Image (cartoon, rainbow, N blue to C red):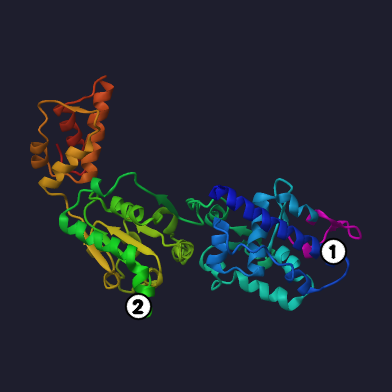
Amino acid sequence: MATMTERNALDLELELDWFARVLDTRFKLHFGHETDYQRITEIEPPDLSSSESTYADFIRQYELGFVERIAIILALVPHLRPKLLDIFHTKNKIFDRKFTEFGGIIDSNGDFAPTGETLVFIVADGYLHASLALQALFERDHFFAKHDLVRLEPQNQNAALMKASLRLSDECLGRITTGRAHHQHLSADFPARHIETQLDWGDLVLHPGTLTQVREIEIWLRHGDTLLDEWAMRHKLRPGYRALFYGPPGTGKTMTACLLGKATGREVYKVDLSLVVSKYIGETEKNLARVFDQAQHKNWVLFFDEADALFGKRSGTQNANDRYANQEVSFLLQRIETFDGIAILASNLKDNLDTAFARRFESIIYFPVPRQEERLRLWQQGFSPKAQLDESVDLDQIATQYELCGGSIMNVVRYASLQALESGSSLVTLEALQRGIRREHNKEGKGA
């Protein structure tokens, strides 16, 4: 029985063969000086309606028509079978240069990379109405853009739209080839990085009240779509979900966001504020808009640590800087409210955030410093099974005596465990633990 990868490869072979026939027909029509638009659209794509491959699922999900399938496969050909595009290297003998109507860009390897103009040539060579209609594929309200499937990437700001390179997003490319969506990579164009955890809910130590509220978010993640669609509540409730986690550092806010994503099969992306916040007017909004645009309709969890740097309180308007700063917060307020995914903001202090945001959170959850019984669990769960605690180590007493957050406790566990390994032993001593605790107190400004 064929594996999913094999089934997908078979369907992509059928799609590539279909594309090759379309391309061959277009060139014959073009050099035969015919402009019969219908001749191209009459070449029917393979029927994959009964296939169970990931590519067939992709076609069904988006109900791809002829033109959309051509756009997708044209953007895919450079990755799977670039030789199919070698015909575009054909030169105009009269002018000793490439045919302008082919569009395309020659990449650093000498291969032909398709552009929007290449798509126009294949689908609608010489047919102006169809050519203009193709531009609608790349408008913001088309599902290509909304779901970040395929886009036109201009080489410079002044280039005409259809002269831009035709590119599949990394996520779309991974999904329709291997069946696994590639993670977005941290960059200036996408200032967020994928985060995950190998831990489970049993490893998370929170105050019971905090954990109860976190579980309420998990319930939304599991049943929100059913509530909106099957219970017909979409016109009554806002899209997406917004939550605020606030409390001291090291109390489990980031880990909780990762576990919510892991438990519900969602990717979690932590927004990198260093790549978002800009001193230049309007740049912060643009940077953050890129994150929201690419995350829209993806069911991602966006995690904003130290969120008050972005969503801080608006101030009185005394000068131009105040006015622009307030406009920035207003933009973020509007954008997060219309985001259809999950946005989790984390802050040390709730009062640092603009009050307008508080009214728009579905959940506001306090992550307190762990109590003695929670600190004891953190100490007990923190060490490796291979570690041996010295007889003088009383974790109950340590948990009672030292008020540390989970992150600080794990820093001490790391330090004491490494000291044991350095000494050639698996024995964790009380002295090493006390040194580690003093180090954490010094970092927090509490002294020895």
Foreground pick, 282 / 57: 57
Q: Which residue bears the numbered disc 2? A: 233
Relative to 412, 105 lies left or right? right
- The numbered disc on residue 348 is none
Q: Residue furthest right?
A: 94
Q: If you read the primary sequence from the N terminus, does the residue marked by circle 1 or circle 2 appear first?
A: 1
Hey, what amino acid is under mark 2? Met
Can the viewer see residue 355?
yes
Vertical relation: 338 (above or below) 266? below
Q: Can residue 169 be seen in this view?
A: no
Q: Tell me the element at label 2.
A: loop
Q: In what element is the residue under mark 1?
A: helix
Nearer-the-camera pick, 65 or 416: 65
Range shown magenta: 88-104
Q: Does the magenta stretch include residue 183?
A: no
- The x, y position of residue 217, in whole percent, is 28, 62
Per the model, the C-alpha gap separating discs 1 and 2 is 53 Å
Q: How crowded is mark 2: few (under 14 residues within 10 Å), some or many (20 or more)?
A: some
Amino acid on which disc 1 is placed: Lys
Name which residue lies at 22% across and 34% down. Answer: 383
Residue position for label 1: 28
Position of 391 compared to 134: left or right? left
Residue visible at 72% across and 73% down in the picture = 131
